[in-house]
Image (cartoon, rainbow, N blue to C red):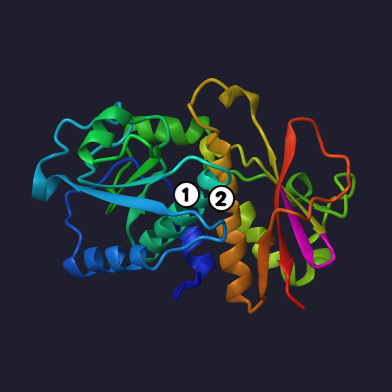
Amino acid sequence: MTIDFPLEEAVKRRYSVRSYSDLGIEDIKLSSIRSFIETLDNPFGKKVNFRFIDKEVTGQGEKLGTYGVIKGAKRFIGASVLPGPLSLEALGYELETVILFLAHLGLGSCWLGGTFNRKEFARAMDIKDNELFALITPYGYAARTKNITERVMRSMVRADHRKEWDKLFFRDDFQTPLTKKEAGDFAFPLEMVRLGPSASNKQPWRLVLSGKTCHFYECRSLKYGGLFSFDIQRVDMGIAAAHFDLAVKEIGKKGFFDLSRRPDTVQPENCQYMFSWVEEK
């Protein structure tokens, strides 16, 4: 899919908002959010389902819990998908695209994968038993000041910090860091990936540029092994794919994602090949 707003502006405007104001969202924006979601797709061919909770209108969210992490939120979007290969990547791709659109509208959001009562939200959002209900986001206008919980959490995960290029991007193999100059036209898409959000800001993506093909790898953080019933860093890989894909389209590059381009190269421990983006000739 393509977007009709400046990607870099939305990426840099987006941050995790955990404290929300009482200011209501204008009807025209609420309508545009739903219309935007109806246009979504992803390069992995999976159907992602979105559901809304509006506590102001329905009252059904009054007992929904976020364990004190989110304050003042009145609206939530939930995303679910049928389990399967690349399903979490598809979910990450589409929900991040929604979150970027929210940022474009001047609205805050916050990825929630563990700090919400999944059973309560699943019941309120009518999630089916066969669906993987991985993530939600509150959305609305940010409060003028951050509460103490928000300030502590941002400090703990170093929310405004991102790894440098030489830790994330490589040329042909994992022994050769990629410079911005060597990246050429790919410098912008790669920088958009670098700026992307991820669970606890771990940035599990590693990208290897080989000619006109970019290989995506997931370098897992072992600490997440028992925390979730799913690999949340696969969602992060979907976020990386979204930032890259939207960026290459914005600069006019044509290409596609392919799972069969795994290069014959030695990869770091705990890293696995996920997919490649291939530029069309």
Mark 2 lies on a secondary structure that is helix
Q: Is residue 93 magenta?
A: no
Q: Is residue 148 above or below residue 146?
A: above
The amino acid type found where label 2 is placed reads Gly
Dot label at residue 238: 2
Inter-mark Cα distance, 1 to 2? 7 Å
* Residue 185 seen: yes
Q: Which image quadrant for residue 270?
A: top right
Answer left or right for 20 relative to 99.
Answer: left
Where does the magenta region start and end?
210-216
Q: Are marks 1 and 2 in contact (CB under 8 Å)?
A: yes
Q: Is residue 211 magenta?
A: yes
Q: Residue at x 35, y 62 (%)?
A: 37
Mark 1 or mark 2, earlier in chain: 1
Dot label at residue 156: none
Judge by depth and name the residue closer to the eye, 200 or 240. Answer: 240
Q: Position of residue 237 (x, y in %)?
A: 60, 47
* Residue 117 seen: no
Name the quarter where the C terminus is drawn: bottom right
Q: Position of residue 106 (x, y in %)?
A: 34, 62
